[in-house]
Image (cartoon, coloured by chain):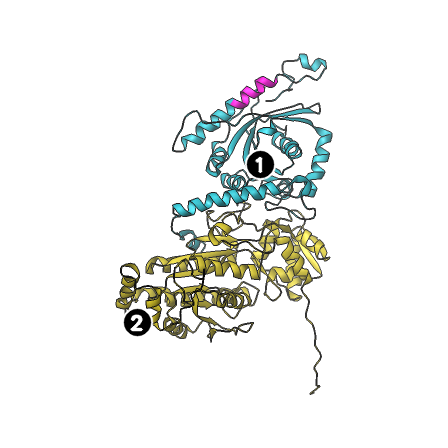
Chain colours: A yellow, B cyan
Amino acid sequence: MDLTDRLIGSSGDDDGCDREQRDRVDRDTDGHDPGPNHRHERDGRTNHRTAGGTSVHGVAGKRVFVSGVGGELGTTIAGLLEAEAWVGELSGIDADPPRHRLQRTVFHRIHPDEHDRIVETVAKFNPHVLVHVGVWEPDARAAPHAAATLTDQAATSILGAAAECSALEHVVVRSGIEIYGRSRGALTRPSESAPVAPTSDWGHTVAAIEHTAARVGARVGVTVGAVRLAPVLGPHVPSPLGRLLRQPGVPFSALADPPFAVIEDNDAARAVVAAARTGLAEPVNVVAPGAITALQAARRGRRVPIPLIGPEWRVARALSFLLGAPIPDHVSEALHRGRLADNGRMHELLGFTPQHGTVDVIDRLYHWPSIIHQPARVQVA
Amino acid sequence: MTSTLGRVVNFPVRDTATRAGAVVSRAAADLNASVTRLTDEQSGVVDDWGRDPALVRAMITAARMRWDVTVGGDQRLARRKGALIVVNARALALAPVFSAFALSEAVDRPVRFVGRPDTAPVGAFVRRIGGLLDHPDEVAGALAAGELVIMGAEHDQRLRMVGRVDHALVGAAVAAGVKVFPAATASSPIGRAARLEIGEPSRSPRRRRGPLTELELADQVGRDIGLLLAEMGDIRTGTPLDWLPLSAIGGA
């Protein structure tokens, strides 16, 4: 029995999240709703309702909890949520501090393996909406094995803790289009209804997150939305694909050179916020329009394209690793088999359209400045 | 963590409101498709399905040396909507391929064809020139996005006979809510003259609620192509080869 099972199985008797309280809230909401203003009064929170500022939940002043708020994507999401009128209190958790200054987000620095602290923090906050973006892409900020472990720990602890909260209404999880896999005969542009058949470690990881979230949602009766993001690129986003494409020489499959699509970090953050706002209750692919191949990307960035056929990929991976741009299996898969997804339902479900197409994002990737060394104003040593 | 974890994810079924949203989304996709013009496509990139416009233009130029295709009936295709066009095919005639190239030029829109393998390098090359996998979901995705898709009936060795039409792919068109057009092709293994004639959209002879719709529609498409072939008559090369009954010249 993992932590999620233990947490869900014991629901009802924990401090602040008892069944009686949950039933009372349900009755208030379903049968004799005293109205949002009364409910907020009772909870002692400020109503931030403005014209057009309520979510589909119909109530302003929601408590939103963001896991993974220390990452670039999480920080951007928190920043966007702060500007949302339907959001009341905002809290976040991560192993690292946020990348930007956040105005009204309460940040908790907790490592994913500190289950008890996570449960205590989440249960105390008692969120209405949980946005779970605390995932570690392999070779982005952690080695593949460590990334999988951290992601699993965070998903289990945070989703399990959220399940214990009586006010919880909606969960949004970050997923990826790697969930569809790229086995032989796999669809070129899988839609959300395509079977989940991951063929990479990262794909298995996001499938497990969706599975855990769906199980939690089914057991506690809340809606769960999964935002399946294309590879996320941004000036400060640690991305193995972005690092690889920015190297002086870019390897590509000479026999296939398949197309892939990406999404910029700001667009990805907007999509996640839209999913929280609209109460997304199913998976949705979030992919920038258009596609590009590794060879085309290298040409646009004026990099040296290095054609590879087969055995030399092993050498290329080792060299790339030494140069600081390791190639995890899901990136290798994208370079050999492509990575596209049907984004036809994105606007319908989220009311959201990416500001940047795939080619645009790749062009911007090559325009982002490299590390700028600033000399010290005062030499102290 | 096992590979079976993700297979049990069950999300709530969409309600009527979201289905209505899907119709709106499809309409938006149709509008987007109308923006894409063959002449406006960017070089140096591929489109959403991995089709390379520059390579397609080069292939169209090269194909002109092999086929001189006369296209008829293209005015029947909606300008902004997707459509499935079913053509008759003879072994090694590459009817869906030359039809896609010719129709692309005629309607100034990207036209995709069904039947690419999923192995490199052939599959990768065919994807670059507009090939789609022979899979109903793949075809349905393209049609729902407002694309024109050509598929071939099964090969039939008998002259001017139409092979079986894959009802699963026709079902994809039914699911995507687009029309299915029969089209007759005629080409010669020794000459350049070729023809593509698109007929009126096929309709299922009976209104059905279940999967019989696609079965009967597929059969009807086959019959409609046969009628179009009969209307086209024989191709004449102007040589004594026309006198031979089994010269392999003709549409089927």
Residue B148's disc is 1
Q: Which of the 4 quarters of the picture holds residue B241?
A: top right
Q: Residue at x 68, y 66 (%)?
A: A369
Asked whether the viewer can see residue A153, the reply is no
> Which three-letter amino acid code belongs to the residue tagged 2?
Asp
The reply to whether the magenta stretch includes residue B230 is yes
In x, y percent, where is residue A113?
A: 44, 72
Q: Residue at x 50, y 22 (%)?
A: B223
Is the residue B158 above or below the residue A10 in the image? above
Name the element at disc 1. Answer: strand
- Residue with the mark numbered 2: A14
Q: Main secondary structure of the magenta part?
A: helix
Gap between marks 1 and 2 measured at Cα? 58 Å
In x, y percent, where is residue B151?
A: 56, 32
Question: Magenta residues?
Answer: B224-232
Q: Nearer the viewer, mark 1 or mark 2?
A: 1
Name the element at disc 2. Answer: loop
Q: Residue furthest left?
A: A20
Q: Which of the 4 quarters of the picture holds residue A298?
A: bottom right
The disc numbered 2 marks a residue on which chain? A
Is the residue A34 above or below the residue A97 in the image? above
Residue in the foreground of this view, choosing between A296 and B124? A296
In x, y percent, where is residue A308?
A: 68, 52
Q: Residue furthest front?
A: A51
Is the residue B139 above or below the residue A12 in the image? above
The reply to whether the magenta stretch includes residue A87 is no
Quadrant, the C terminus of chain B: top right
Quadrant, the N terminus of chain B: bottom left
